[in-house]
Amino acid sequence: MVPARADPPPLARAVLPDGIGARFVDNGNGLRMHLLEAGAGTGRPLLLLLHGFPELAYSWRKIMPPLASAGYHVVAPDQRGYGRTTGGEGADGGDPADFRMLRLVRDVIGLLPALGQRAAAAVIGHDFGAPVAAWCALLRPDLFPALVLMSAPFAGPPTLAAAPGATPGMAALDAALAALVPPRKHYQFYYSSPAAAAEMEAPAEGMAAFLRAYYHMKSADWPGNRPARLASSEAAELARMPRYYIMDRGASMPATVAAARPSPAEIAACRWLPEHELAVYAGEFARTGFQGGLHWYRCATAGIGREEMQIFAGRAITVKTLFIAGAADWGVYQAPGGFERMQTIACADFRGAHLVAGAGHWVQQEQPDAVVARLRDFLD
């Protein structure tokens, strides 16, 4: 169990690229939000960048300065439960219901007045930050007139047919995965389990080595990432994905990614995540643990907040939308049909899907120049 956190100082300037600063704002929703910021200035259009799991505002460090140089005020918060943002968590990481989707959206909306802005030019989300960004645009197109999703397609709000409670079909899927040979489990079930936080917060090899292996295994550097469309959500079909998605039944995530731990030579050759940058992630998660971020998954698998999301069943995102992911990112296809539904049904003004060569799941870190070029074309 991670003890309650004292309010930390902003991230040290020494670990940030030139042009990026760090500060705190009160978001009006119970949080003291830690922000990274570039290009602040009167009259500059605002870009809000929302990270995923297990990441931080720091994950956007490579694209913030070039976007600021293009004339934007670029802001990336540590989201609820992450990094140096505090409020809403107790000694056990807080109530999972405090991490439901519409509360996360409220967190983002609260940043606008805190930053002295009436609206953003765009909201951009990666991984679990992508559905938060999507819901921001779905609910408040007046505040977020452009949307960029990275790595995680958005298939639309849940239907009214889904009953309250656990995500429909997940219990049956868990049983079907358990019946495979060897038995398997979905990573979201693992992240929702009581064991996940303890196992990830005390990996045998240490926090830095665990995160190095995790980030490596989901990147284009790992040769096992050769994503393809899945024909269905049947257990045997999902089991085509790497084991960081469909895990061995009795394995922890640290044990799973340890099998793909990079060699010293591979680490030395990793230009997108050198050791001094990995140390920032390792230091933050060693200090805070993962409990807050894991609550996001608990909401998803337990259906916490789904009833209020069902109010918007059938509603499409009307603002212009772009999708960017790495060509080696299985996240594009992990929910069969979601990639296609995003382009044809969920987003009424879809402007394109770009799969970036030489990138896996961490696209804005692995290939920042290509991502900035796509963003500038879309935003301009």
Image (cartoon, rainbow, N blue to C red):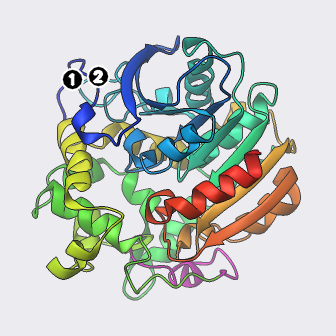
The answer to whether residue 316 is visible is yes
What is the three-letter code of the residue carrying label 1?
A: Ala
Dot label at residue 90: 2
Q: Amino acid at mark 2?
A: Gly
Q: Which residues are magenta?
A: 229-244
Q: CA distance from mark 2 to mark 1?
A: 6 Å
Residue 151 appears in view: no
Q: Nearer the viewer, residue 362 or 376?
A: 376
Pick the quarter of the image with the C terminus. Answer: top right
Considering only order in the chain, which callout, 1 or 2, is on the residue closer to the N terminus?
Answer: 1
Q: Which residue is mark 1?
A: 4
Q: Are circles 2 and 1 on residues that touch, CB within 8 Å?
A: yes
Q: Secondary structure at mark 1?
A: loop
Is the stretch drawn in magenta largely helix, strand or loop? loop
- Residue at 44% across, 65% down: 366
Q: Is residue 336 left or right of residue 14?
A: right
Near-viewer residue (315 or 209) = 209
Q: Is residue 6 above or below residue 125?
A: above
235 above or below 287? below
Residue 262 image point, x, y percent: 23, 78
Residue displayed at 42% across by 50% down: 53
